[in-house]
Image (tube, rainbow, N blue to C red):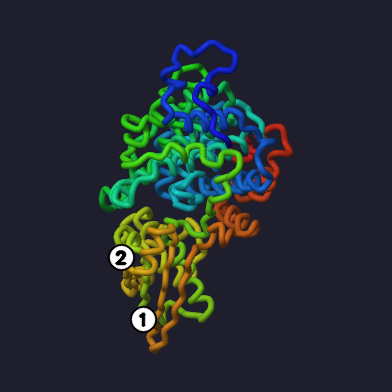
C-alpha cells in the first residue's frame, strides 16, 4: 500500500473535523497509523484471500474449543462464578454454559477462559485470545453476518501484529518487562470495530479508545509464584477493545493521536523503549499477517512445545517406558531456564509454565488436554518422580537462535537405567508455519476439548457450522449451539 499524505487522510469533500488535532493530527509520525485506520475502515470480506479466511475460521474453531475446555477447569469455574450474578438473558453467549453477558463482559470472560489452559494460538503472544472473543461478542450483539465476523477476525490479526512490531521493545527491556502482551487490546478493538463498521473518523476513535483502554503489560512470572490467575490479563484487553468499538459507534471521540505519539503515546505508556511507526502500515493489503499464527498441539506455553515434541518423539520411536528413565537432559534457550524451570509447580498455571512438568506428561504419554492439570495428575507420585529426573541447561546454539530469529530450539537426551541414551533435537514446534497442524489435527483437538462437556454431542455440528459459516447469512444457529441455554 502506497503512502498517502496526511492531508489526504482527512474527510474527502467534507468539512474538517472539530477534533482534527486528535483524530487527524498533521505530524508525519501519525501517517502510518492513519493508513492503518483507513485500511481497517475499508476492509471487506471480499478483499481477503481465501486461505486467510480459512485461517480465520480455523482459529475461531480452535478458540471456541479452548473456551469450552477452560470452563471445565478449576480456574474456569471460579471465573464463571465471578460473573454469574451479572447474567443478561438476551446477551452474548459463553460457549459451553448457559451464561449470557453484555458484549464487553462476554468478550472478557471468553477471552479469559480461552487462556486458562494456554492452549490457544501463538503469534507474538496469543491473538485469538482477544480477537475471537471480541469479534464474536460484537457480531452476536449486532447480529452481524458471518462475513462481517470473519473480516473482523482478520482485522484483529492484521492490526494487532503490526502494533506489536511497531512497539517491539529492545532485548534489554524485553527481558524484564511484558511489553509484548499490550498490543492485544488494540487487536481486539480493531476486530470489534470492523465487525461493527463505521466511518473513518469512528475507526480512528476506536483505535484511540483501544490504546487508552489497554491495561499495563502483565505476566505472572514477574510477580512470583504461585501464579496469579490473571495470567497476561487478556480478558481485560478484550473488554477494552469491545468498549472501544461501542464508544466509537456513538461518536465518543477517542485519542487517536496517542496511537503514534512518540513522547506520550501508546508505545511509551506500555514501557517500550522504541517505536517504529512505519510498521503500523507495512504491507497492508499485500502481506497478510493472519497467515503467521501457530496453532498449539499442547496446552502450555508455546516456548515449551519443541521440548515436548522432542520427548514425545523419543518415547514413541524407542518405545521408552517412563519407569526405565534414569535421567532426562534438556538443552534450550535461557528464557526456559530462567522463567520456565519449576520442579514443584503448585498450581495448574505454574505447571503450564514448567518445562519439567510438561515433559513428564510427554514421558507418560498422556493425551494433550485439560487432563494434564487435573488435581489427581498434579498430585501424582509418578509425575513428581519424573520431574526429579529432569535437568535443564542453556544451549548456546538455542540461545543464539532465539534472540536472532525467534527460533525455539530444544535438544533432549533421555538416559535409561540400563545405560542407553537417546537424543532428539527439534528446531520448530508443531503448529509453526513450517510445520502446520493438519485439518484433521485441528478437528481432533477441537473435539477433544469438548469431550466430557455439555457440548460434546454437538461437536461435529459446531465444527461444520464454524468452518462453513460464510455460507450462511447469520451466526444465530452457531451461537445457539454454543449456549447450553438453547435460548
On screen, residue 43 above or below 272? above
Question: Residue reaching furthest right?
Answer: 471
Residue 242 in picture, x, y percent from top left: 49, 30
Residue 335 in picture, x, y percent from top left: 34, 59
Badge 2 element? loop
Q: Count residues near mark 1 (Cα–Cα under 10 Å), then give few for <14, some for 14-19, many for 20+.
A: some
Q: Residue at x 65, y 40 (%)?
A: 48
Compared across the picture, whether 435 is left or right of 255 comes to: right
Quarter of the image where the N terminus is located: top right
Cβ atoms under marks 1 and 2 closer than 8 Å:
no
Give the numbered dot on residue 395. none
Badge 1 element? strand
Instruction: Indicate the quadrant where residue 301 lies.
Output: bottom left
Q: Which residue is mark 2?
A: 343
Q: Which residue is mark 1?
A: 326
Q: Count residues near mark 2 (Cα–Cα under 10 Å), then give few for <14, some for 14-19, many for 20+.
A: some
Amino acid at each position: 500500500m502506497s503512502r498517502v499524505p496526511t492531508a489526504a487522510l482527512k474527510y474527502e469533500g467534507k468539512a474538517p473535523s472539530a477534533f482534527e488535532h486528535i483524530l487527524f493530527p498533521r505530524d508525519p509520525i501519525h501517517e502510518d497509523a492513519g493508513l492503518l485506520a483507513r485500511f481497517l475502515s475499508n476492509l471487506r470480506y471480499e478483499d481477503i484471500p481465501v486461505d486467510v479466511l480459512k485461517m480465520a475460521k480455523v482459529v475461531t474453531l480452535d478458540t471456541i474449543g479452548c473456551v469450552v475446555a477452560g470452563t471445565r477447569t478449576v480456574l474456569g469455574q471460579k471465573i464463571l462464578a465471578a460473573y454469574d450474578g451479572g447474567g443478561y438473558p438476551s446477551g452474548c453467549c459463553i460457549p459451553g454454559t448457559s451464561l449470557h453477558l453484555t458484549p464487553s463482559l462476554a468478550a472478557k470472560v471468553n477471552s479469559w477462559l480461552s487462556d486458562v489452559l494456554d492452549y490457544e494460538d501463538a503469534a507474538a503472544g496469543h491473538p485469538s485470545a482477544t480477537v475471537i472473543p471480541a469479534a464474536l461478542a460484537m457480531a452476536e450483539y449486532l447480529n452481524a453476518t458471518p462475513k462481517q465476523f470473519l473480516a473482523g477476525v482478520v482485522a484483529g490479526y492484521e492490526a494487532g501484529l503490526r502494533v506489536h512490531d511497531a512497539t517491539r521493545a529492545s532485548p534489554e527491556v524485553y527481558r524484564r518487562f511484558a511489553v509484548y502482551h499490550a498490543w492485544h487490546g488494540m487487536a481486539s478493538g480493531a476486530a470489534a470495530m470492523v465487525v461493527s463498521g463505521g466511518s473513518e473518523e469512528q475507526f480512528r476513535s476506536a483505535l484511540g479508545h483501544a490504546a487508552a483502554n489497554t491495561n499495563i503489560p502483565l505476566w505472572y512470572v514477574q510477580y512470583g509464584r504461585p501464579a496469579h490467575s490473571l495470567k497476561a490479563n487478556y480478558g481485560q484487553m478484550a473488554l477494552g477493545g469491545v468498549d472501544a468499538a461501542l464508544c466509537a459507534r456513538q461518536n465518543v471521540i477517542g485519542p487517536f493521536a496517542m496511537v503514534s505519539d512518540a513522547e506520550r503515546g501508546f508505545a511509551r505508556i506500555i514501557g517500550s523503549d522504541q517505536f517504529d511507526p512505519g510498521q503500523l502500515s507495512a504491507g497492508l493489503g499485500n502481506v497478510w499477517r493472519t497467515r503467521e499464527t501457530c496453532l498449539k498441539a499442547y496446552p502450555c506455553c508455546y516456548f515449551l512445545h519443541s521440548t515436548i515434541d522432542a520427548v514425545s518423539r523419543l518415547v514413541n520411536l524407542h518405545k521408552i517406558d517412563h519407569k526405565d528413565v534414569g535421567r532426562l537432559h534438556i538443552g534450550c534457550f535461557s528464557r526456559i531456564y530462567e522463567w520456565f524451570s519449576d520442579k514443584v509447580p503448585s498450581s495448574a498455571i505454574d505447571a503450564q509454565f514448567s518445562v519439567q512438568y510438561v515433559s513428564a506428561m510427554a514421558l507418560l504419554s498422556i493425551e494433550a488436554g485439560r487432563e494434564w492439570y487435573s488435581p489427581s495428575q498434579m498430585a501424582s507420585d509418578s509425575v513428581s518422580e519424573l520431574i526429579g529426573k529432569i535437568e535443564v541447561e542453556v544451549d548456546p546454539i538455542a540461545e543464539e537462535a532465539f534472540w536472532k530469529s525467534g527460533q525455539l530450539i530444544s535438544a533432549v537426551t533421555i538416559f535409561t537405567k540400563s545405560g542407553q541414551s537417546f537424543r532428539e533435537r527439534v528446531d520448530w514446534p508443531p503448529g509453526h508455519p513450517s510445520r502446520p497442524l493438519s485439518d484433521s489435527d485441528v478437528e481432533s483437538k477441537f473435539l477433544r476439548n469438548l469431550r466430557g462437556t455439555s457440548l460434546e454431542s454437538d461437536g461435529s455440528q459446531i465444527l461444520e457450522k464454524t468452518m462453513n459459516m460464510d455460507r450462511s447469512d447469520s451466526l444465530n444457529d452457531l451461537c445457539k449451539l454454543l449456549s447450553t441455554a438453547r435460548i
